[in-house]
Image (cartoon, rainbow, N blue to C red):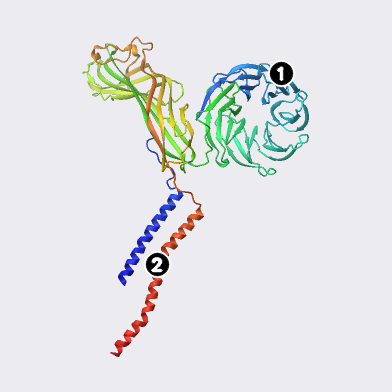
Amino acid sequence: MRLKKTSYFSFLTIIMIISVFSQTFLVANIQGTNNGITTTQLISENNNIKKVGQYDSGGEVVGVAIHNNYAFLADQVKGLVVIDITNPVNPIYVNEYQAEGESVYDVKIIDDIAYVAHGRAGLRILDVANPLTIIEKGVISDGGIAWKVLVVNNYAYLVDRINGIEIIDITDIENPQKIATFDGQPFDIYIRDEIAFVAAGVNKGLEIVDISDPSSPKKISEVRNEFEDTVSVAVRNDLAYIANRENGIKVVNIKGIRRPKIIANYSNLENGKTWSIWIKDSFAYLANEKDGIEIVDITNFENIKSVGQFKDEGESQSFRVIAENDFIFSAEYEEGLKIYSWKTTAPLPMEDDYVRIDSRSFNFNHSVGPFGAEAYLGDETLALNMSLFLDIGLMSPILVTADVPTKVNAGDNVNLKLGITGENSRFWGRFEGTVKLITPLGDTEVFSLTELGIPEQVDFAAFKTFIGENLTEITNLNSVRLFNITFLNYTVSVLLTPFFNVTGTATVTAGITDNMTQYELDWTTDGEEIIIPIQIPEEVEDFYAIPLEEFQFEIDDLHLDLDNIRLDVLLYDLIPLYSLELNMSSFNLTSPALESKKSWLNPNQENNNTLLFLDGIYPLGYFIIRINFTGGINLPPWSIILLTLGLIVAMALPWILIFTSSRRKRTDTEPIEEIAEEILDEE
């Protein structure tokens, strides 16, 4: 009986242990401890925006509107300028319009009619059905400065920097009539339903105005924005986004329209000012003046994320940006109109936290050479007789990172984020040869470079890996101590200081293929991040593998030109004895001593100083990004607590049953034991 109890106890113990571990594993799976953090072979801050085309009007472009295949530019110098953008790569001038020599600040086009905020020339209404022949249809001017215009139904809402918001009845476009004015010095207006949201200007914030009766606008509420200039506004759902120049954008909760409240802000400015905001889908497009254009994901107002940025060189100043027809159009002041595109399709809203699944560095390493040289440097009193054999190479470390959302399942639409940064590149040289030092005290023996302690490989020049940028710089390596020799109680050292001119361009390109789409990726700026929307198939299990194909380094006319080499001979490592500067013409490239070595340099080539020249495409490899799935479902915290309590009860119940069973058996056996004792007593 006791053996059976022990067996029963052991059996239940094993069952409970299995139960606890299996249920704990289930909880871990449900909670997603995996978090999608895996990859296999991926070898490894402007982004996935590419400039497609540009038109420089020669004026000062501050606004743009797109209609059919034409861009209408608001130019402070030339008025309204019309550009044919049928081929965005090559915009073509079509026509222009200007009244009274005044500036144009904004234009909107509805059904072939252009409404032009023409500065001191007021509101101009133009027929642009044929852009080659612009016909003026209507005019209204009252001495103010027409800054922005918005057309809703039969009304034009003219933002006048002096008079406020002027509401104009345009039922008859040839005879527009002003019916009301809302006082102020605003910069912008956005209208939804019968409510106007006004960017109120200098040291002011957002004003909310009832325009249900256009002839009698009434302010409902406002959000003060002290000491900041509110210059642009856009609305999405129950949130208004206002641009504040120096401080980026602020998010205003307008659900309670009579009590709006600033609830978040976002700024990524370095030198610029945010002049305008344009919202399309889940993204806000910002014109950040000297900081160029920026695209931010506004899916979650508490965590606004930058998903694209482009800052051009030169005097570019972005004042207005809009997104139309799969392109981004930016009014960039003295540099005219610039047209951009996403490198991939627009990314999905990024709501999830991201985790880095891999971060690795690999090298582009290319050797060019060798060449040989024999040179006698100096004169009969002090000289170096050198025989050299030199290989030249380029090594560019490149860091690639891959990020995915923390929770990924089959069938999900997710964003894969790829980043690339260039670390310090370097040109290197590998030496072989001999050196003989000639001094007034006599000549040294012939030493090999190895005997003199000259390293076989020396860095000539180091610089930031250039990706998509023209590189033109003169750089020099800190002096390299070639050797020290003690000769007749004198210690003589030789320092070598090379000066180089590095020119060229390089880009890293790749293609990524999932089962749905082929994406051609092109990193155009060092440190950029590419956002790639990936549709994970439903039928795959456990993980999804994505190939990164044709990963390659493209180099265009990369030169390492020798400017000069300076050799300094020092006594006791301090006193200068001799200094000599030489260029490639100082070397005898056809030295008999090295005739067995093939010289890479051709003395007849156009630039005799070029030590290294690269031009072409150099494959970097074929890599696989592997995303493991989270698996299971996500349970709320209360369900985990209930599951834990269930485990405790499940573990305790068998012991309660055993204890109860044992007590019952003892109680049942007590009368039998008493009778047995009585019988024994009688005996």
Q: Looking at the picture, which amino acid does disc 1 mark?
A: Ile
Label 2 Cα neighbours within 10 Å, binned few <14 / some 14-19 / many ≥20: some
Q: Position of residue 571 (x, y in %)?
A: 29, 21
In the rendered image, is residue 285 in sight?
yes
Q: Do the residues labelled 2 and 1 touch (CB within 8 Å)?
A: no
Sequence-wise, the earlier of marks 2 and 1 is 1
Q: In which quarter of the image is residue 251?
A: top right
Q: Position of residue 655 (x, y in %)?
A: 40, 67
- Most distant residue in the top direction: 604
Q: Distance between the residues labelled 2 and 1?
A: 95 Å
Residue 322 numbered mark, or none: none
527 with respect to 375 (left or right) = right
Compared to residue 127, the image places residue 673 above or below, namely below
Q: In which quarter of the image is the N terminus?
A: bottom left
Q: Quadrant of residue 488?
A: top left
Q: What element carries label 2?
A: helix
In the rendered image, is residue 44 in sight?
no
- Most distant residue in the bottom direction: 682
29 with respect to 236 (left or right) = left
Label 1 Cα neighbours within 10 Å, binned few <14 / some 14-19 / many ≥20: some
Q: Position of residue 265 (x, y in %)?
A: 59, 39
Q: Quadrant of residue 471?
A: top left
Residue 135 numbered mark, or none: 1
Q: What element carries label 1?
A: strand
681 with respect to 59 (left or right) = left
Residue at the (73%, 21%) spot, across then down: 121
Q: Position of residue 645 (x, y in %)?
A: 46, 60
Q: Quadrant of the C terminus?
A: bottom left
The residue to which callout 2 is attached is 655
Q: Nearer the viewer, residue 431 or 406?
A: 406
Q: Looking at the picture, which amino acid does disc 2 mark?
A: Trp
